[in-house]
Structures are given as C-alpha cells and as structure tokens.
Image: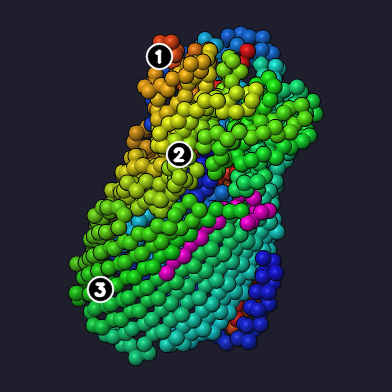
Amino acid sequence: MMKLPHLVSLLLLSMFMLVSCSNDDDVLDMDEGQEEQEQEAPADFKYDEGFLISNEGPFNNGFGSVSYVSSDLNTLTNDIFQAENMSDNLGNIVNSIGFTDNQAYVVSNVSNRITVVDRFSFVETGRISSGLENPRYFVALNGKGYVTNWGDPLVETDDYIAVIDLRTLNVDATIPVGLGPEKIVYDGNQLYVAHKGGFGTNNIVTVINPTDDTVVTTIAVGDVPESMALDSQGNLWVLSSGKPAFTMEETGGRIQRINTASNTVVFSSEFDTTSHPSYLNIDNDQLYFFLDGGVYVGNALDYLVPTTAQLDVGFYYNMAVINGKLFGCNAGDFSGAGTLEVYDLATNALEAILNVGVVPGNVYLNQ
Amino acid sequence: MKQVFYTLIAVWFLATTASYGQTDRPTWLKEVVLTDVVLKQFSPAQVVTTIADSTALLSASRLSETLRYNSLLFLRENGPGGVASPSFRGTTAQQTAVVWNGLNINSQLNGQADMNTLGARNYDQVMIRRGGGSTIYGSGAVGGSIHLNNTMSFDDQFETQVTTAAGSFRTYALAAKTTYATQEWYADLGIDLNQSANDFEYLESPLTNENAAFSTLNVNTNMGWKDPNADANSRQSVKFYHNSFLSDREFSRTLTAPSQSGYKDAQSRSLLAYERKKGSATTAVKLAHIFEQFKFLTNVETPENYTIGKSTQYIGQLHYSYRFGAQKRLQSILEFNGTQAAGTNITTAQRRNYAGILLWQHQPGPRWGYTAQVRQDINSVFDSPFLLSGGAFYELIQKDDRPNSLGYRVSFNASRNFRVPTFNDLYWLGAGAEGNLDVVPESSWQGEIGHTLRYKRMRLQLNGFLIKSDNLINWQPNPSGIWRPINVAQVTNYGLETTATIGFDVQSHHFDAALQYGYTQSINEATNKNLIYTPMHKATFGLQHNYKWLRLNYQQLVVGPVFTTSDNTQTLDGYWVSNLIATFDVLQTAQTLSISLQAKNIFNTNYQTIAFRPNPGRNFMLQTTYIF
C-alpha cells in the first residue's frame, strides 16, 4: 500500500497536477475545541501516553509530518517535528516510523533519509542520510536498525536491507534480497521481510538471522504480501493482496499462517480472484483486515473466514488496530489534510474524527 | 550531447557562410502569411494578443519564459527547464490548447503541452487567444489557446541569422536559421540548441539545484510554393511545415528531497497544406503527422531503466470556405484524426475521431460584426458534446483618422467547450492505478464581455469572464485503493482582465509600455475551495525604450499567493520578479549584429512557482544575433 505515493509521483509527473476535489471536506468535529485542551506535560514527555500518526505529505513536493494524539483522543497536535525542531522538516514522503525504547526513526522515502528523534520529546538526535535508496520500513533490535530498501524501483535486482549501527547511525552492511521488500517484523528470534514487490509484484517472505545478518530462507506466500502480524502463540500471519487486475494475471488475496519454528506455511485461506484484501492487524488475537471498504474480523487462534464486514468505512489508505480501537487513515483527496477515524471495535461506535496531516499513512502506540 | 553541439555548429557555419551578404536588412514584422487564417477571421470578439516582437521571442530561449513575462498565463514550472504547464483563467493545463500552425498539439498521453519542449525561437509569431475556442481548435481550448505560427513571405530573400548566447549556470544557446525565398518559392531551415547545467544556488539555503541539467534540440524546416500566375481571383499554394524536438532533462531536486530521475522527450510534427482559391471559394487540404514520446528515468546514471509512453497521430482536414460579398463568410472543416498510443503503462490503444465544423462570420456594417460556430466530434471511444460558440462586437465610438479620435468597442462571446479524456485517462495500466473507459469529456460553458478603448497610441482593454466546467476528470482511489479517473468535479471560474498599452515618443526616444492584470477565482463547487496553484492575482508590466542603436527593456512580473493543498490550508507566497534587458545594435548595414545583455531577477528575489522548487536568484545572459 505504501508504494502509492511513489507511484503517484510518477503518475503526476506524466499527468501533472490533477484537478483537486475533496470528498470529505466537511469534517465532523466530534469534540469541539479539542485542540485547545492541551494539557501541561513535562517537556521531555510531551508526546507520551498517546499515538503517533505519520503523514506522508504532498506527493510531489514538500514534506511529511507526524501528528500526536493523546490516549483519550482529546489532545491532538499536528506537525510535532517542526514544532520541536525550529521548523525544520522530515523530508519528502514520510513513509513509516520504527522505534527503540527511547528513540523514533522516521523513514522518509523520497528523501532517502531517516530522522532520529527522542520518541517522547520529538527533538532530533541524529540523521541517517546515506546508504538508503527508497527506504520503506524500519525495525530495531540489539542496537541495530534494519531498513527495507527498494533501490531503483525500475531495477529488480538491487533491493536490499540496510543494517544500521544505531550508535554511529552508519549503514554498516547491506543484505541483498528479492524484489520489493516492504514490511519487516521481528519475532524475537528472526526477522521476516514481506516482499510486496515494489512497482512490480512478488510473493515471498525473506527470513533473516540477525545474529549474522544472513538470509536463512525465503518462504513462498501469496502474491503481493502486503502486511504481517504476530499472534500470541508466536505465529506469523501474512496477508497477501493478490495481483491486481492491471497485471493481466489477476490473482486473489490470501491469508496465511507461518510457523516461525519451521518457517513453513501451515495454513492458507484464499480469497476469490477479484478480492484483494489488505492491512492485516492482530489485536488481542483478533485478526483484522480490510476489503473493499469493509473491516473484517476473525480469530487468530481459531480462524474462520469472515463473510461479512464488521464495519463499513469506505476507502482507507491504511488502518491500525490498537487496544480494541480501529484507527482508519482517510487520506481524502490526497492533496489536502486527511483525517484519522477512530472506532471502538467493541461497540462499532465512531469515537473521533481527527484532522491530521496530508496523507496519513501509519498509526503507532507511543508509551 | 556536447560533441553533437560542436559538430552542428561547425556544419552550420560551413553550410551558411557561402550565403554571405545576399539580402537587405530584415524587418522583423514582415507581411504575415498565416496557415491559421481562421484564427484572425473568426475571433473578432475575443482578445488575441500577438507576440511577434523580436526582443520578446529572441531574448528568451524557452517559450515558458516568453509567456510568463508577456501574458496573463500562469505557468507551473518544475524548476527552470523542467516540465512547464500553462493555464488560463484558473483552468487546468489540460484545458489550455497549444496550437501549432493551426493544429492542436497537446499531448495525447497527458492532455497538456510542456512549454519547455517548445523553443521560443522556432516561431515567427506567438499568439495568445483568451477564452474558449474548442469549436475551432478542439479539445483543451477551454481557458484559452496558445498559437505558435511560422510565417512564409514570398519575397526575394536569402538570409541567415545566427544567435549565440551564454549565461549563468553554464547556460549556452545556439540558434541558426536560413531563409531562402523568391516570388514563387520559400524555404527555411532552423536549428535551436540549448543546454544548461542549471546548478544555481538556492537563495537562503545551503542547497544547490542538483540534478537539474538539461539540453534541448529543435529542428525546424518550412517550405512553400505559391502559384506565380496568381491574380485576385485565383491563387494556389502548397506549404510544408516541420518541427522536431529532442530533449534530455534531469528532474531537479527540491528543498525537501534529492533527485536522481530525469526524462527524455522526442517529438515531431509535420504539416502539408494545399490551398486553392477560385473566385469566392477557397479549398484547402491539410495532412499532418504528429509524434510524441516521453521517457522517464528513475536514475539518470542508469538510462537503460525507464518507463516510456508514445503516441502517433495522423490528421486529415478538408477546408472549404465561401465568401458572400465582402461581409459574409462561411467556412466548413471536416477533420479525421487517427491516434495510436503505447507504452510501459498503456498497452497499444487507438482511437479515431471525426469532427465537423461550421463557422459563420458576418460584418453587416463597419461598426459591428458577429460570428457563429458549431462543432460535433464523433469519437470511437467516448461521446463528445455538441459545441457551439457565438460572439459579436460593436464599435460604440468609431475611431477615425483624426489624431485625437477616440475608439470604443464592446464585445461579447459565449461558447461551449471541451477537453477529451487522454490515453492515460482511458488506458493507463500500472502499479495501483488504471484508466477508465467510462470517462467522458470535460465540458464547460463560458461567457465573456470585453471593452476596448483606443486613443492615440493608447489602448485599454477590460474583460470579464465566467466559466462553468462540468465532469472534470479526477484521479481518485476506489474502495480497493486502485486509482482511477472519474468525472467528478464541477468548477466555476470567474475574473477580470485588464490590459493597457501606450506608446509615445520624446524626440528620438521611443517608449512602449504594457500593463496587464488578471484577477481570477477558481472554485471547486463541491468544497467551495479554490483550486490549487491558481493565483488570484497576476500582473505583468513591460517598458521598452528605443533610441537609435539602443533598446532597453524592463519586465516586471507579479504573481499573488496560491494554495498548494485542496483544503486551502497551505499557501505558497506570491512574488515580484524583474528583468532588465539592454540590446545594442552594433551593426546596421546589409548585415546586422546586435548584442543583448540580460539581467534576470535583478532584485535577487527568492521565489517558487511550485512549492519547494526554488528559482534562481540574479542571473545574467549575453546574447549576440548576427544576420547576413
């Protein structure tokens, strides 16, 4: 899903500026005056006890941003990086954020840059600006950061994982991998990289041993593995969207479970050819995914294919399920500010619609 | 490229030095013989501005610059030399038609014309026609149209002009054109080369404009034959026009991101026209071929990796016009257009378009006239709306020959215009996006009222316009996240435009001044917000001073702020930019040599036309033009 901005820059380059039209400009304000209710918090922990939202920013030019909302959804602050760093910016297309206990690593895709900040004060502590080419996602463990990189999106053989020494912020090693590495997950033992396929398509998960940074194996999964999540039993669930119609070899999506001890697919549930699910989340062993404007729920420990959507929400650019809440990223027309729609999944009640930045793309718990 | 550059210079000099000293000193504004006669005859109620002045056309190598400083067009330019898309009256670049010798040359892939692929020096005349013109010029003539014309003068001449230029940021230009003509034959051949490292320093920033170099090559040739036995009642001619363009451009970085990408264009357009007049009837047959190719390179270091799009058009037109006495004229045009497009994201697709056009013009008296026009297209892929246009003018106060006479004309024009879906809109197939065969043409209704006051060498124009566009094509993600174009937006544009020109002499000093100001509102009906990148205010001011061998030009551009997000929460500041050009006519005999010194952005203004893409600060260019 996160390849869209890049694609869109290309599209825009050829099509240029599209006439703008917004479909949801009349944003519901669920709690009027929420932005004024900002509470006094210790300066160093200003952005603790809440959620961070990464906003990609405008397609072609400009910069992305990060928004903060408190756990009770009452305090929303946009552009927190600019606010804490003398109006500097995070660079073009803020794709994702990775974390250690104290630091946040903000990945800017087009700028080929990772900005390191204190995750609770959002004051910049460092910057990684070499050794990255089209960086996508970041995960940290044992003092090292692992970043998926597409390389040149038109070259299928230059994709890699950059291994960063988090003390020096240097890219110390690169691990060549197959086409289009996207999301990266650590299960406490091994790293799993889903190869969504960049501008093309791919159908593998690469397993990396972080002790010697070598590829252990690759696991064949469905086409376009787009998201991954771990359940409480340590199984890795992989959601593949399937090849879209424009490839002329359309395939349906799949939800698969990988046994991380044997690194084999032990369960596979297939969608029909024209169904392309996305945005897999596991929260309290409930497994959530998005399909054609609906949010579906299954049980990760006893999975039965859900046939009806729990919620109909329209198009989300991404969604996250955290502690029983659904955070839906509504990018609107992609050229103005987007909104974050928050639902309580126990009651399906819409709790808030928050006006965040341009093209909200990921939501993270920050505490 | 560099070697090609030098080789061409050498070849040019070898080929042309033999023609030394054949003709008289040229006059810049020769008798104008346009292919596009329709432009003048059928636009009596609209503002048509001509830039035929040598200084304006020759001093800027890029057409984008010429238009920016000499018209109310707004240009979104991706940095100097980058893709530059023009728009009129708050419309989009797809709603702005670029017309080359009467042919609409907007891209079949993206619907717009990149002004930086069109060299200013290639044309004898650039005309800007505000307001709708789809009945004559087809798709895209909604906000207005830009006309690039080559003229042919059938008078004995053999001359060559060579222009060389060198400027800041390692910018070089070489243009040469040889013209040979008799009473019966005409031929010209021109080459225009431009290259620039374009690596200027961003003002108030440690960054420089990296990955921004460009080089472009234009080759033009025009040929004509005119029946030497022509008389008032019978004449015929054959004319051929050709323009080829190649470019290699890097796609510059921005303030927020570096860039490695680039693009290469290849374009070619040819037109063969036969015209025969017998008595009151004129018949013309026109055949044209237009080719465009666009390559996008993700990394200029590895040019073997690219995406590509191309299209080929074959056009045939049959014109028949008949004059009923001196006051009435009826013209019909039948057009066939067959287009094929292919590329990385378009599997080979074709479409055929047939158009029937009827134009009527009548001037019942010396004080007033009107025109009525209709057009219907039949397209193999989508349904096109019936188009019509009507306009009239009336001289409320008729200017006569007395020196203090005043002239006042009012004019009125209303039209229905369209912009058809592009091949990208219909057939795009790529990661996360696909075209939609169900999209229909955008259509618009518009009206305008104009006032023109003339007194001595003063002219004041005031125009008010209203455009209501429907079915605007907009790419949006569907519920599965696939981007598709749909006809969704409705936009209303309205505004006022004023143009004032004045000329006066103080002894042997000649002064000409022109002031243009446009106020534009462009509102998305669904959201009641302004469209992005449509300035509410734009003004240009030009002052020219001629004294014997010296010409001084001052150009002032003022552009108001624009919104950069559709919710109108982010704004890009407006700017004032000034240029100063001094031209010295060093030699004014049978040969002429002029040297021009250009200082651009003399007040070192830090400004952006697209957010986060800075423009150069103060910069200079030295240009010489030698004609023999």
Residue A146 visible in rendering: yes
**Residue B408 appears in the picture as rendered:** no
Secondary structure category for the residue under label 2: loop
Is B214 situated above or below B613? below
Which residue is under mark 3?
B321
Residue B275 in the image, given as x and y percentages of width and height: 33, 79
Q: Nearer the viewer, mark 3 or mark 1?
A: 1
Q: Secondary structure at mark 1?
A: loop
In the picture of the structure, the residue carrying the numbered disc 1 is A348
| Distance CA(mark 2)–CA(mark 1) | 31 Å
Tell me, yes or no, whether the two marked residues, 2 and 3, touch with CB atoms within 8 Å.
no
Which of the chains bears the disc numbered 1?
A
Q: Amino acid at mark 1?
A: Asn
Q: Which residues are magenta?
A: B289-304
Residue B278 at x, y = what percent? Answer: 26, 83
Q: Residue B520 lies in what quarter of the image?
A: top left
Q: Are marks 2 and 1 on the same chain?
A: yes
